[in-house]
Image: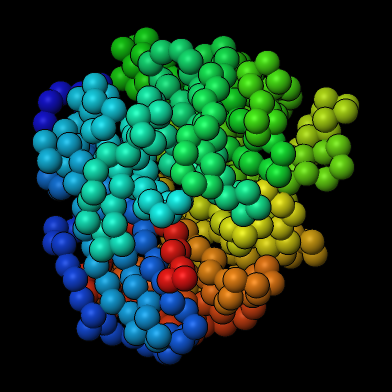
Amino acid sequence: MSKSLFDNEASDSEAWHLQGNWGPVKEELTSSELIIKGKVPEGLNGLYIRNGMNPRSGYSDHWFFGNGMLHGFKFENGKVSYKNRYVKTPYYEKDLDVISSFSDLSASPANTHIVKHAGKLLALEEAHLPWEVDEELETKGVYDFSGKLKGAMTAHSRICPKTGELLFFSYSMMSEPYLTYYRVNKKGELIQTESIELPRAVMMHDWNVTENYVVFMDLPVISDMNLAVETGSPFGFKPECGARLGVMPRDGSNEDIKWFEIEPCMVFHALNSYEEANKIILYVCRQKEAMVGGFQDIYGGDTTLGRLWKWTIDLDLGEVKEEQVDDAPCDFPRIDDRRMGQKTDYGYCMSFDNKADSLTLGRHLLKYDLVNKKRLIHDLGENVKGGEPVFVPKSKDSDEDDGWVLVLAHEEEEAKSKLLVIDSQDFESPPVAEIYSPQRIPYGAHGNWMPAN
Ligand SMILES: [Fe+2]
């Protein structure tokens, strides 16, 4: 691998993201002989896929830079099979490092998320184009919406359950426009591209979508190549740059955006957002600060852990009310995706440990009852860590929260990984099924459920 701007930060193979269950696995496996504790619900039919970083060489400069590996669990009438495959992009084929990959928009690690829209299954990372894969997890090719997507695609797109649209953005560290907005119709045609003005390049990992608006988060983890030369890191937390929320109609443009100032902070992941009369409500996992010591410093103490916050944007008064919902460190927030952009009563998160000296997942899944302001806890058990909870409805028409929560968990002492199926309405009870994978599954990023029909 070539030398990179990050060499001075993590040239040792002892880095936390290469240790224990953060470290990569080597084999691509296919198995229908899985050990299952409990009973897999008969009505749960479909495919759960989780993406994550798995450096092919065994080494990457940063957790974010490992090659994307997909782990898939296929559910068919109470039976489950497993498969894992790399996303085979030029980043994988040529064993590139991230700086080399910037010269080729197709050379994605494709390691952050997986989304299905208009029949296409796309593996996503935020600095490159999407890569299409099939439901056997085999790589099909780079995907650019018939040549209309000329920049990167965020890993955190949103699908509107009412219109079927896929909404996403792209941010650039290198050159203006630092932000671009895209709208894809339900047939998969890219129908809108808007350049958005920002005063500087910032890291923008996630955003918010309501029924009529999108809300961008211009937060002060700034991106500056001069900073990289000075400090070795292209990202740094600069609260003096201020923080803003930008509200734009979904079919609007830069001229239509209204910006609202908030307290400087960082948000990697948003839970959900919706409109209420002249207000927009956002639930986010807010960090007081982030990457204070540079890009490598994902965990920099308690102030860099996410907590659930509620932001209420008053469109008439031009103000944002900022309220902390809970003090429990958490992130990887998810909802019942059928409610994306609409009022949601429930949210699901992964807890984080605030006593560690590196980024450490907690042993709890959290379910927030946002109406009654209650937090339910699913205890994964001693020395078991989890990941992003993904909600699956029991049926297309079932009520919000009437379904299963799927989460990939890892038994650290046994070095065994398992997919848990938790009854969401009996959230604090043991899982109804624990499905063990034939080899461990490294802690990773995001996943989704693709129903069989
Ligand atoms: Fe993310």
Q: In percent of the image, x 24 and y 25: which residue is there?
A: 104
- Residue 128 x %, y %: 33, 32
- Residue 423 x %, y %: 56, 79
Q: Is residue 30 above or below residue 299?
A: below
Instruction: Count the marks.
Output: 0
Q: Is residue 353 above or below residue 65?
A: below
- Residue 171 x %, y %: 46, 26
Q: Quadrant of residue 173?
A: top left
Left or right of residue 91: residue 78? right
Left or right of residue 421: residue 319? right
Q: In percent of the image, x 58 and y 75: which residue is there?
A: 395
Closer-to-camera residue (267/14)? 267
Identify the colour scheme used: rainbow
- Tell me if I can see residue 318 in this picture: yes
- Residue 99 x %, y %: 24, 25
Q: In percent of the image, x 30 and y 43: which residue is there?
A: 131
Residue furthest to the bottom in view is 38
Q: Is residue 411 above or below residue 69?
A: below
Image quarter where the N terminus lies is top left
Closer-to-camera residue (299/46)? 46
Closer-to-camera residue (140/65)? 140
Q: Quadrant of residue 38?
A: bottom left
Q: In percent of the image, x 83 and y 45: which residue is there?
A: 276
- Tell me if I can see residue 310 in this picture: no
